[in-house]
Amino acid sequence: MGNRLDFLQKATQKIYQTIGGIRAISGVYKTPSWGFESDDFYNACIAIDTFYSTSEVLGYLLQIEVELGRKREGDDVYQARTIDLDIVLSSEGIINTKKLIVPHPSMQDRKFVLAPLAEIAEKEKHPVLQQTIKELLESGEDDSIVSLIDEKIVNPKEGYDLARFQYLTIEGNIGAGKTSLAQLISNEFNAKLILERFADNPFLPKFYENMERYAFPLEMSFLADRYQRLQDDIAQFDLFTDFVVSDYDVFKSLIFAQVTLQEEEFVLYKRVFDLMYRNLAKPGLYIYLYQNTERLLRNIKKRGRDYEQKIKPEYLDNINKGYLQFMKSQPALNVKIIDVSDLDFIANRSDFVSILEQIC
């Protein structure tokens, strides 16, 4: 009912915002009504990447239907509606519960399902019938007319042009979630991913036991390692054609060093740092994830790295202050500070999308 294409686009937008990234979108097919007299229907299929279970996805879809004006008169009543969202296939395979059956039990009999589905997943096999979607479409007995219209559904992620930054760096305090966000953005926008690798640093556990003694060798080893790895990783890409996202920048070394080193040590350290830093490519956008100290400590405890459990709140406070002071002192650096203290962008899709909106 109503503006059919608009309802399809709005549903796709809400799915993107609440359930997951959209990997593929079929064309829109005009098909005759099925089982009752009505105007022609518009149908389409989308493929979604999500960390929610199929049953959780169903709950979100039902809510989206309500938000878009869907009114149900009964499960067995065919009727025109503003929107109808069905799970046709799932990577969980066969599901048979009171509330949900996957694969959809009637999909193989309905050309208005198989035609758009074959466009984006023709080689996928029906887990019960063991035929591909293309084979089901070609052998089906439904002879109804299905026609592709000119209008298309737009993938909502096209509204978030992160690639224009070419090189995106995500930074933050210990436990702020910078690596997780970098991975999410990389997956969503097919970006080249550069992650910091430091688990094998022999000075790190010793530093948390005796910060004063091991601060200088720790910071020098981090600086040398970050510089070399970032230089090697960036050299693999063309920053004019590739979209690259990293979870660190070498200048974080200066932040931590300023907090941990004695004054004489820091003077020497900064001389070495300045020589290295001038030779590295600078990010098109630098994102700093701010989290309050209480939340950082909870995150650190949750991820369970033994050598991090003795980190003091004062140390995290100083790191936050160091980052903010450094960014204020770098007017040429394109910086976006995002407060994620009340967000859980790993477990909540809408929180992740809200970050994308702040970036753009």
Image: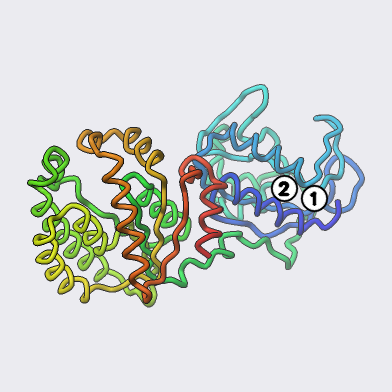
Label 1 Cα neighbours within 10 Å, binned few <14 / some 14-19 / many ≥20: few
Is label 1 in contact with label 2 (beta carbons under 8 Å)?
yes
Element at label 2: helix
Q: Position of residue 266 (x, y in %)?
A: 14, 62
Q: Residues within 10 Å of mark 2 (few under 14, many from 20)?
A: many
Is 355 placed above or below 208 here? below
What residue is drawn where x is 90% and y is 48%?
A: 38
Dividing the picture into quarters, in which one does residue 336 lie? bottom left
Residue located 25% across and 34% down the image: 309
Between 144 and 153, the one nearer to me in the picture: 153
Question: Residue 111 has which mark?
Answer: 2
Colour scheme employed for the rendering of this structure = rainbow
Mark 1: amino acid: Ser
In the rendered image, residue 52, in percent from the top left (x then y), is placed at: 53, 37
Q: Residue furthest front?
A: 263
* x and y percentages locating residue 186 in the rendered image: 41, 57
Left or right: 119, with 2 as reference point: left
In the image: residue 268, left or right of residue 27: left
Q: Earlier in the sequence, mark 1 or mark 2?
A: 2
Residue most toward the right? 37
Q: Nearer the viewer, residue 162 or 351?
A: 351
- Which residue position holds label 1? 144
Q: Amino acid at mark 2?
A: Lys
The answer for how far apart the CA atoms under marks 1 and 2 are is 7 Å
**Residue occupying image coordinates x 82% and y 58%:** 3
Residue 170 position (above or below residue 87):
below
Q: Which mark is residue 340?
A: none
